[in-house]
Amino acid sequence: MRLRKQLPQWQRTLDWGQEKKAVSTMLRDIQVFTWLEYSKSKDAAFCFPCRIFGKHLKNDTFVNTGFQNWKKALDVYREHEKSPAHKASMESWCSYKASAAHGSVVEQLDSASEREIKERREYLSRVVAVTKFLGKQNIPFRGPDEGMSSDNQGNFLECMNLLKEFDPFLQAYSPPSHSTYLSPSSQNEVIQCCAQEIVKAISQEIKEAGMFSVMADEARDGTTEQLAVCVRYVAGGSVKEHLLAMTDLKGFDAESITTAIEDQLRLNGIDHVKVVAQAYDGASVMSGTVGGVQAKFRENHPMAIYVHCYAHQLNVVLCCTCQAIPVARNLFDLLQNVYTFFSGSLVNHDKFKETQKQLGLQPSELVQLSKTRWSCQLMSINAMIENFPAVLTCLSNISNPTAVGLHANLARFTTIYLLMVFKTFLSVTESLHKYLQSETVDLAKAEEFKCAVCATLKEMRTDPKATEVYDRAKALCETHQIPESCVPRQRQKQRHLEEYIVESSCGAASDLGNAEKLRTNVYLPCLDRMIAELEQRFSSLNSVVLKGVQACNPGSSTFLKEEDLRGLADHYNVDLKREEVWVAKHYLDRKQESLPITDMQCLFGLLDNVMFPTLTQVIKICLTIPVSSCSCERTFSVLRRLHTWLRSTMGQDRLHLLAIMSVERGELSKLSQSQLIDSFAKMKQRRYRLLLKK
């Protein structure tokens, strides 16, 4: 038996061998009574809607056995058609057909609801996109007057208005007045979603890596002490450093700082992951071996070795060298005084800029010295040398006692010689300074570069190098007609003691030449002090760990030396297999012929962790050990750009979230609009649904 939907289907059930009259009669009846159907096997007529939708009509002829009295067919059909049961079945059938064509009422409502949700999400995607843009670019969100009549409603609302001018969807869509998602509270929620999703992604990568290192530093922001906690780990074969959190410090002692770091690890669910190292600056509260942060942190993470930030150490080396030698200290004091003279007065600064134009020099500024600003010594020296003609000319044209004194000190051969000396020395260390600030630098390469810098400085003790510096100073003096003589003032001898004073053990020895005096009294002392500071301050790292790291460095003479690798592996409870080291040596020897292995990261990518599980684990540890805490310093630089006087009333929570968005702008760009909208929808119970059915 077939469900009757239209005539051709029924026609296929007829035996066309029947009489034409019977066929034409049945066709006529079916065309008149659309509910009628015929069964060839039973030679009977049935009521389709009653049979399918009649729940209580099991004993009815049109449902059970079928109607076969063809002589009274029309009368019976009409009588059945008028019955209440048939009418109810017909209504059910009509509803079914409408439902099949357009869906049920519930489905239609669901479809309308789904369409509304998609529209809301489409609208919210614009809100999220503007939030991401402003957060990534460090642009303030709000304005002083965000009313509809305001000429400037703030960057956030103005960006939405700008989008609306070119976006047909925003022009056509009108959100409910109480769900525009443009209020300050909605802004904060979207910002929070962005920051949380960034940190969530970072935490997930750390869990998959199975190990990480902690870097932390604190700085004062107005009246609040801010702590930045960064992490370093290996993911996808590359080293990554990210900002994990920023928080306010309640106390400045080691216990408070350690607790703050531990709290952030726990809040992000990575407190159980192995911590292999910790890197801070050299402040006693951080580096103390008994009561410092590094000691207290190791109570819960005993494997976490302490690394004194290499970049901070190098900065201390330069500062100590520049301040320990009297002539060097006098030079940098002079540079600072010249900077203050021109920058502290608008009149003097304007004269300086005018002199630059007259001499055809590129407009540039002198550089201020700062103990916390790295490489500022070299920048200050380079700025002075580039602007030396303008500085001398401008000072000579100003009738001021201060200007006269500064000019007298600058227009001396000794001053110019010192400028050339420190330009040479600091240029050697500058490449190391920049390399140490890289996120991907590893400990082995840092040690290599440090040793290379020390070796380069030691080579500069030779006479040809000293003579080269002297000649450059002499050439600059000749350009500006500065005399080369710098004979020091002799102390007046007392006449009654003249016969008893011995000034030379060799009798009437001749005075040293000018170049030799400067080399002996200035060049070599400054150079030796810098070398000594470098060798002394960079020797505090655990020797066992350092040997193990060097053994993982393809450029080291101890590469894959089993004894050194064993010490590092034992410290981190890695059961290093001797056979893996042997096989790796032969495997890498064959690889070196076609693919040179330059560093640890390249080595880690070549070794398969299935074939070399313990060796790759050791190399991964070496890559995870940080060299500096520069990521924290970069965070504070972003903080200064965020917390300007225009945004002085911003709360700390919002400040921390915006800092994460700005620092981790790369991770922010990876977040999809849909992902952020889902997070926003799940944050709390919303007035309108925003989540799509899966």
Image (spheres, grey):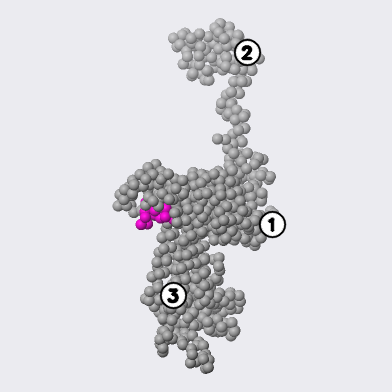
Figure check: 80 above or below 113: above
Name the chief secondary structure element in magenta.
Answer: loop
Q: Position of residue 480 (x, y in %)?
A: 46, 83
Q: Check disc 2 and report the residue beneath it.
A: 56
Judged by depth in the image, the label closer to the viewer, 1 or 2, is 1
Judged by depth in the image, the label closer to the viewer, 1 or 3, is 3
Q: Check disc 3 and report the residue beneath it.
A: 524
Which residue occupies the extreme front position in the image? 500
Q: Amino acid at mark 2?
A: His
* In magenta segment, residue 417: no
Q: Amino acid at mark 1?
A: Asp
Region of the chain picked out in magenta, as a range: 546-560
Tell which circle, 3 or 2, labels the residue nearer the N-terminal end.
2
Residue positioned 46% across, 49% down in the render: 571
Q: Position of residue 507 (x, y in %)?
A: 41, 88
Q: Secondary structure at mark 1?
A: loop
Q: Position of residue 372 (x, y in %)?
A: 55, 65
Q: Check disc 1 and report the residue beneath it.
A: 145
Tell which circle, 1 or 3, labels the residue nearer the N-terminal end.
1
Residue positioned 63% across, 57% down in the render: 252
CA separation, marks 1 and 3?
A: 64 Å
